[in-house]
Image (cartoon, rainbow, N blue to C red):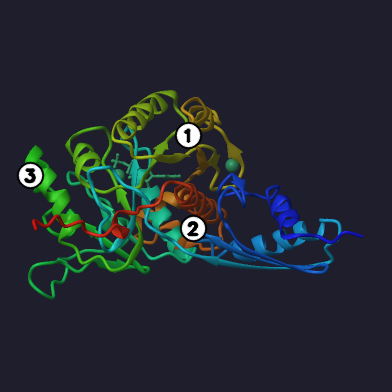
Amino acid sequence: MTSITKADVEVHLCQFIDPHHGVDLVSAKSVKSIVVEGEAVSVKLELGYPAKTYLDTLKADVEQHLKTLAGISSASVDVTVKIVSHAVQQALKPHPQIRNIIAVASGKGGVGKSTTSVNLALALAAEGASVGILDADIYGPSIPTMLGLSGFPDSEDKKTMMPKVAYGIQTMSIGYLVEADQAMIWRGPMVTNALQQLLRDTNWKDLDYLIIDLPPGTGDIQLTLAQQIPVSGAVIVTTPQDIALIDAQRGLGMFAKVNVPVLGIVENMSVHICSECGHEEAIFGTGGGAVMAEANKVDFLGELPLDMAIRINADSGKPTVVADPNGRATQIYQKIARTTAAKLALKAKDFSSKFPNIVIQAN
Ligand SMILES: Nc1ncnc2c1ncn2[C@@H]1O[C@H](COP(=O)(O)OP(=O)(O)OP(=O)(O)O)[C@@H](O)[C@H]1O
Ligand SMILES: [Mg+2]
Ligand SMILES: [Zn+2]
């Protein structure tokens, strides 16, 4: 009998689809090593996205898959995670303390960007990543309330601000710095400066991901983000109503123009869950986000129900992912978080920091 080779195992692993990447382990470059000894195989996998709550399942599933290969009787799989920086807009360089900035945007207001942003940030943290959130809504900051934070940030050197921390997440918002109604009168350049300062003058510490919660629409703040802030990917939030979907398409176009990859679409408030009896009703219809994703050739990251508990948790300063860590909505947020990070992991890596500085010297 001919024995199994490394190449046979690799071919076999091409048939295992990682549900977060949506592609097989080999194409996703997750396979680091394969060792075959007789009928025993051991495989080392390395994921580019945080997946603490999924690693055991992946390990068991891949071991099971390997054992279906004729000639293999035992399999052991080892999975590690390594999160690296991905490419940003051509004219920009990644922030030295932030491996990846992910913008959360929508065309229309009130679709749940901020709620999705905080829960996504907390979900990435629950999956093992080091995470921050920057509230880019200069006119109507909502991150402080959603995370139960207030008061002026500390400064150790009187030049930079320490991020305020809640549930292990580093945060910054104009809401810590000015009274609620003060920023409302600011115009273009002031708003642009405010956003850049919030990013630049905050002492972010070693973040895998910084989530930027954008205001609605495509105004000055979005323009600043697109042109001056090094973003590796964007997430678009929509609701099932058609009009919101059309608006979201405008959001898609904005990122396409500056070559920031859209990692996918999240459909929010899709199915209504009755708080009395738990029965589900698709008030606005379903599947709009998935159809829009398909039509625009971007990924569909998942859908959140319209659930009163999500609003109550956000209003009380303890978002669903931390208020109800084992609940159904939290599981959805965590799957969306893993998928978002996994889609980013498939994108081009950043090599700018690896190139030596080229100095031209006259002889
Ligand atoms: N899935 C959900 N189920 C129930 N309520 C939700 C859900 N998502 C968001 N909400 C609620 O809807 C309202 C709007 O949400 P949010 O502030 O996150 O939207 P936004 O898109 O950030 O709004 P804006 O455009 O004003 O920044 C909030 O009261 C929030 O608690
Ligand atoms: Mg908001
Ligand atoms: Zn009911």
- Is residue 26 rendered to the left or right of residue 50? right
Between 288 and 285, the one nearer to me in the picture: 288
Q: Residue 313 location in percent, x, y?
A: 41, 56
Q: What residue is shown at x 44% (from left), y 46% (from top)?
A: 347
Between 270 and 124, the one nearer to me in the picture: 124
Up-down relation of residue 86 to residue 302 (above or below): below
Q: Earlier in the sequence, mark 2 or mark 3?
A: 2
Which residue is labeled 1 in the image? 298
Q: Residue 106 location in percent, x, y?
A: 34, 36
Q: The residue tagged with tag 2: helix, strand or loop?
A: loop
Query: Which residue sits furthest right?
Result: 1
Q: The residue tagged with tag 1: helix, strand or loop?
A: loop
Q: Residue 102 location in percent, x, y?
A: 35, 49
Q: Which quadrant is home to the C terminus? A: bottom left
Cα separation, mark 1 vs mark 3, equals 34 Å
View quadrant of ligand 2? top left
Which residue is labeled 3 in the image? 190
User: Is residue 108 visible to the viewer in this orientation of the structure?
Assistant: yes
